[in-house]
Image (tube, helix red, strand yellow):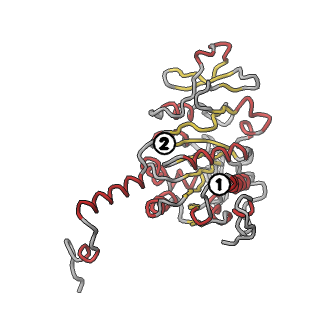
Amino acid sequence: MTDVVLDPTKRGYWTSDQDVRWCPGCGDYGILAAMQFFHAELAAEGSPVSKENTVFVSGIGCAARFPYYMDTYGMHTIHGRAPAIATGLATARPDLDVWVVGGDGDMLSIGGNHLIHALRRNVNLKILLFNNQIYGLTKGQYSPTSEVGKVTKSTPNGSIDNPFNTIGVAAGAGATFIARTHDLDRKHMIETFRRAHEHKGAAFIEIYQNCNVFNDGAYDAITKRAARDEMMINLVHGEPITFGADKQRGVVLDNGAARVADIADVGMDAIVVHDAHAPDPSLAFALGHLASDRQSPTAFGVFRAVDGPEYVEGVNNQLLAVNEAKGPGDLHTLLHSGATWDVA
């Protein structure tokens, strides 16, 4: 680590000396900047955050270069395994802030199992899933979030796979914190990172991220500034879920399924009041499935934020109880007892 700028309240303090190697115009630049500014803000607020207690763990893919560009500790691991490796780190060093970074291919394809188990265990990790609906590093194959009909090098006749709904995956795994943001709004990203950082347990953030080389404009109909009023649904706990330039539309539930309605047609009493703290994840699941494509109004913000038993704390409490009951372990005795044998 190189301290070029010595003031931790400045972005430069958190910026490494490595050349950033993403394609010009990639959405990853905006996410990186937001994360660097976020850590500078934490320092300015008197948070004990430091380079020495912050770690970024990544898998393989364009997003996985992230640890090189944060002037903190970091590890570029293997494809899909970042949540598993980060679980080991968080368990051994619960004093660290551990962030996990991966793309939709890395996290939801080969890494799908590791992701859902980190979420169900509620390990104290902050997991960022960069979703550009494509494989970027390997040059444009379809991914687990690509839409049906997507024509790529690996699906020349169009994909016939139904894509994962990322919010639904997280809710189904029982994640205690679920959120969505996008790469064109630094303020929204920073606020989402802050909420995740404050959460005790597994925090999952999906980030809509543009790949301007292999899937340019995938989210333009939703996240471009001119479209946001009519297409982005901002979730605020305790408030009715309304949107539109004049707040003329809202979200209602029909037999548990969320849909968009004109308030003039259904009345305000029918509009769902967002409850991010509901013990049951069904509302988060329904809101995640509100949009069936990338041309429909889509929910952003914190879908779910609930308390739950945290994995690392549970492991450590268990070890303390065992030590109290049986005394400290003896490694020599362990290695020379039970099913052991000599190899001639």
Q: Is residue 28 visible?
A: no
Lower position in the chain sequence, tag 2 or tag 1: 1
Find residue 4 and report its horizontal and vertical position in percent: 74, 70
Q: Which of marks 2 and 1 is in front?
A: 1
Residue at the outermost left position: 338
Tell me if residue 175 comes above or below residue 126 in the rendering.
Answer: above
Q: Distance between the residues labelled 2 and 1?
A: 27 Å
Q: Which amino acid does label 1 sit on?
A: Gly
| Residue that appears at 54% across and 22% down | 253
Give left or right: position of 225 versus 144.
Answer: right
Tell me if mark 2 has few (under 14), some (14-19) or many (20+) residues whose alpha carbon lies within 10 angstroms of its own.
Answer: many
Residue 59 higher or lower than 298, as above or below? below
Quarter of the figure with residue 187: top right
> Element under label 2?
loop
Q: Name the spot of residue 257 as percent of width and height, x first.
A: 52, 26
Q: Name the residue under label 2.
A: 176
Q: Report if residue 281 is visible in the image.
A: yes
For mark 1, what is the residue? 46
Q: Where is residue 96 in the image (x, y as percent from the top left)?
A: 53, 60
Amino acid type, label 2:
Thr
Secondary structure type for disc 1:
loop
Which residue is at 58% across, 31% downward?
237
Q: Where is residue 204 in the image (x, y as percent from the top left)?
A: 55, 47
Single out the residue that lies furthest toward the right.
226
Residue at horizontal 45 percent and vertical 62 percent from the top = 88
